[in-house]
Image: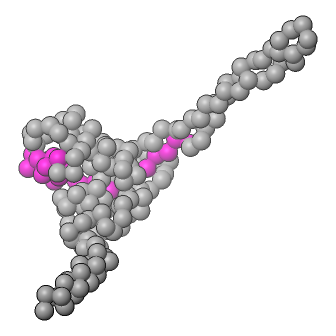
Amino acid sequence: MIRTLLPLGLIGVSLMACAPADPLLNPHALGPSSLAKDLIHSTSKTPPSSAPGVCWANAVTPAVFETTTEHDLVTPATPTSQAVYQTVTRQQIVTDRQQVWFRAPCPALMTPDFIGTLQRALLARGYYRGPLTGTMDTPTRAALRRYQAGLGLDSEILSLGAARELGLVSYDPETTPSP
């Protein structure tokens, strides 16, 4: 009887290894999240909408430059002299500066309790290492920037999308105005 149970047990363990990961047990099983769908690229100095109860924030992503250095031949080598080169450095814009607007929790929601919960959420994910103060201080803002940068938003202002990802706010897509 032991001989028949042992192979069945091994088959069961093998099948468990092939089972898809449970996203409730492993939130990263669904793949990395992105805030790209929540970002509105605009040059406007005003938010995309001014509906009551909808708060916006903006961030400016700096331009990205690429610097290349080349050594151009000025004088070829001769039997009596060495070659002469000139160093030429060029800069080129790889990505233009952009302004993005994104939905943000309204100021009334940013209470010390809410910010303390934000700090705990960032602490649990390894982004924050400071004390739980309930204030939007420099370490909290830096941790928030690191967290949101991984989601595609380089800002120290909490976005509504990041707040949802962290489990700080919930929303009903039917009643929440879309940007």
- The answer to whether residue 4 is visible is yes
Q: Position of residue 124 (x, y in %)?
A: 17, 51
Q: Position of residue 179 (x, y in %)?
A: 38, 63
Farthest right residue?
Answer: 79
Q: Residue at x 64, y 35 (%)?
A: 92
Nearest to the observer: residue 14 or residue 72: 14
Question: In the figure, residue 10 lies in which quadrant?
Answer: bottom left
Q: Residue at x 32, y 56 (%)?
A: 103
> From what the image shows, is residue 114 above or below residue 69?
below
Q: x, y (%) of residue 146? A: 31, 43
Residue lying at 43% horizontally and 50% vertically, measured from the top left: 100
Give, as a single range, the part of the protein colored magenta.
96-123
Indicate the quadrant where residue 87 lies: top right
Q: Nearer the viewer, residue 70 or 53?
A: 70
Quadrant showing the N terminus: bottom left
Q: Is 116 situated left or right of 179 in this image?
A: left
Residue 20 painted magenta: no
Picture colour scheme: one colour
- Res 111 seen here: no
